[in-house]
Amino acid sequence: MKLFYKPGACSMAAHILLNETGTAYQLEKVDTDNGTTETGAAFAATNPRGYVPALKFDDGQILTENVAILHWIGETFPTLAPELADEPLQRFRQLELLSFLSSELHKAFSPYFSGKTFSETEQTANLDRLKAKITQFDRLLAQGGSFLLGARFSVVDAYAFVILNWANFIGVSLADWPDTAAFVARINARPSTQKTLKEEGLAA
Ligand SMILES: N[C@@H](CCC(=O)N[C@@H](CS)C(=O)NCC(=O)O)C(=O)O
């Protein structure tokens, strides 16, 4: 299978998880601004909506959207969804968290990467919304413990890490949320994350 990714973007969650499993896969870097991949191919042929991530299977089928891709990885590699076997509702807890991360936390960061210019009032509203979503995340983490679904790392943690790590790039400190800051540091320290950061050219 092949993961279409953009360095540091949300596609890094799937990248971390594929490294975590040790499964064989290929990478193809995408320039979403000009719509081409590193091979020169038009990315629209892979995802007509033009954004990463996209996962292409060996039979040519393509899966897009973080929620679907991350859920697929969790179901395909059960060691990445350790709690799902224990209790049927946990499968839906994973979906609940993926949905929150995708439609709430991820999107609260979107204005900062939109390339748009915001008025002072709009900037304040964007920051207030972002802080409110980080606070909501912090409360969800408190229900989980060390990780969002409990004591063990799962697919939702990789996605949460990638999103929250963007705080570093937009100058928002996580110091007001010490548990969340410790969570980010914990995922950052995993060998799979360090390998991914290197493969995406974001660490030496
Ligand atoms: N709905 C998509 C959104 C993915 C998304 O926002 N991708 C960003 C990177 S984090 C992207 O490729 N942006 C470039 C663009 O939209 O042109 C998902 O959840 O997978």
Image (tube, helix red, strand yellow):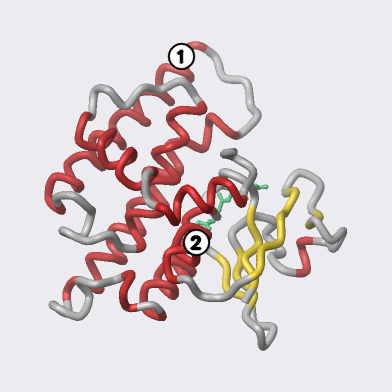
Q: Earlier in the sequence, mark 2 or mark 1?
A: 2
Find the residue positioned furthest to the top: 120
| Relative image position of residue 25 (x, y in whole percent) | 60, 72
Q: Quadrant of residue 130?
A: top left
Residue at the spot x=47%, y=71% of the render?
22
- Label for residue 14? 2
Residue at 66%, 84% (x, y): give it. Answer: 58
Position of residue 34 in the picture relative to residue 97 (left or right):
right
Residue drawn at (15%, 53%), measured in percent from left and top? 144
Quarter of the view holding residue 53: bottom right
| 145, 51: nearer the viewer | 145
Picture coordinates of residue 96, whole percent (x, y): 28, 61
Residue 89 position, x and y percent, is: 17, 74
Q: Which residue is mark 1?
A: 121
Q: Is residue 86 left or right of residue 63?
A: left
Amino acid of disc 2: Ala
Q: Residue at x 19, y 47 (%)?
A: 140
Q: Nearer the viewer, residue 49 or 157?
A: 157
Quadrant in which the N terminus is drawn: bottom right
